[in-house]
Amino acid sequence: MIKDNIMIIVGESSADLYASLFIKEFKKLDPFTNLWGTGGEKMEEEGFEALYHIRELSLIGLFEIVFHLRRIIKIRKELLKEIKKRKPLAILFVDFPDFNLSLAKKLKNEKTLKFHYISPTVWAWRYGRVKKIKKYIDKIFLIFPFEKEIYEKEGINYEFVGHPLFEIVKPEKTPEEIREKHGIKDKLHIVLMPGSRNTELKFHTPALLDAIKKLKNRYGKRLFISLIKAPHIKENFYKPYEKEKILIIEKEKYSVMNSADLIISTSGTSNFEAMILKKPVIVIYKLSKLSYLLGKHFVKIRKFSIVNILAGKEIIPELIQDKLTGENIFKESFSFLENKERRETLIKEYKKILSLYNNVNFKASEKLALSIWEELKEKKDG
């Protein structure tokens, strides 16, 4: 007997984590359906069959994507062949909108149900992707409350499921335990999160190293700096940090973040994580000049971090592109470390945002799995 199967398309590490949680919840409802597609280690740990690993798809910036376009098109072509062969009951596209929506377009006439988890940032740029979602996706699952208004207005089938990070960001150790482990009981602890892609490390490292030297000059032995290593990043990208005696950490991510006095992080998921942990964060981001200039032309919003977007104003500093200098990182770091009132004001702003999720009485992954399971059951019964 041929088993039912569902295809899942994931293109980077945070989506690998989110999708793994969905797989875990879905298997509670249906342990027999095969789950396959593109993914990473987290998904494979849940029994997922990854035809392509996320490292083969994870790119950033227009020109970086153009450089690898032939390989991406080849992967899409092979996936289309597998879809024709396996005939999945449904396809779950997780984030990764450019690749996923182009694949969904190719499947317009296929009977398989097409779901999209995590909306593209249509509220920030390229609003036209909403039309593609309406045309090629049967249902989209949202993680930010303000997105509901967009899809309601456009008449698109959607469901708000909450954010999966609330079920993920759970420190296993107390700040005291982490500080004792690393011998930093009375020190100022800064945590660096310079990115989850090779290109991010390439662009962010020079400014970070400059800031580190300035901070060391100011605080001396009172300062302890650690760096949370991202999966799939080549070891040589971290050597400059090791030379500065920065501790590279691969495990206990949320425990380490929770022990920090300050986090310096790329714009992205880690900003939301810092907010959940109620930690001050400085947002950094830099692209190649050409990618940034072209992207800037299309961006509709002034803020990059989702925390500031949710707040409706800048509550955490954003050092983007030319503003990303060692001097600016140092100034913002010094302000947070020395200004208690600024830290307390930020925590109050965090709590306002977090209150938007207080009435969500379910886990995002659990809700997503149940909704898709019910949709598939209805299709099969029908």
Image (cartoon, rainbow, N blue to C red):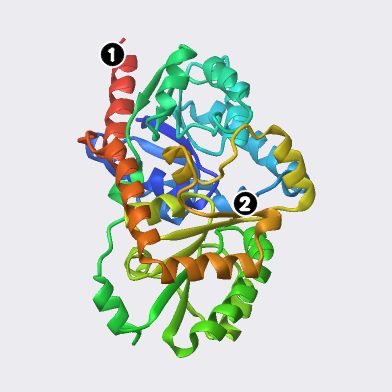
- Quadrant including the C terminus: top left
SS class, disc 2? helix
Query: Residue 176 vs residue 243: left or right?
Result: left
> What is the x, y in percent for residue 128?
63, 22
Amino acid type at circle 1 is Asp
- Quadrant including the N terminus: top left
Q: Identify the residue at horizontal 56%, vertical 68% (top origin).
A: 331
Residues packed near mark 1 inside 10 Å, few (<14), some (14 to 19) or many (20 plus): few
Residues packed near mark 2 inside 10 Å, few (<14), some (14 to 19) or many (20 plus): some
Query: Residue 306 vs residue 324: left or right?
Result: left
> What is the x, y in percent for residue 21?
33, 46
Q: Identify the residue at horizontal 22%, vertical 33% (top origin).
A: 359
Rendered view: 181 above or below 272: below
Name, please, the residue furthest toward the left.
361
Residue 381 vs residue 279, the one in the foreground: 279
The residue under label 2 is: 56
Residue 5 vs residue 207, the one in the foreground: 207
Foreground disc of the pair 1, 2: 2
Q: Identify the residue at horizontal 41%, vertical 54% (top origin).
A: 42
> What is the x, y in percent for residue 309?
48, 39
Residue 361 vs residue 123, the one in the foreground: 123
Q: Identify the residue at horizontal 24%, vertical 70% (top origin).
A: 174
Amino acid type at circle 2 is Glu
> What is the x, y in percent for residue 40?
48, 52
Task: Answer whether residue 2 is visible to the viewer in this image.
Answer: no
Q: CA distance from mark 1 to mark 2?
A: 38 Å
Residue 347 found in image quarter = bottom left
The residue under label 1 is: 381
Rendered view: 85 above or below 320: above
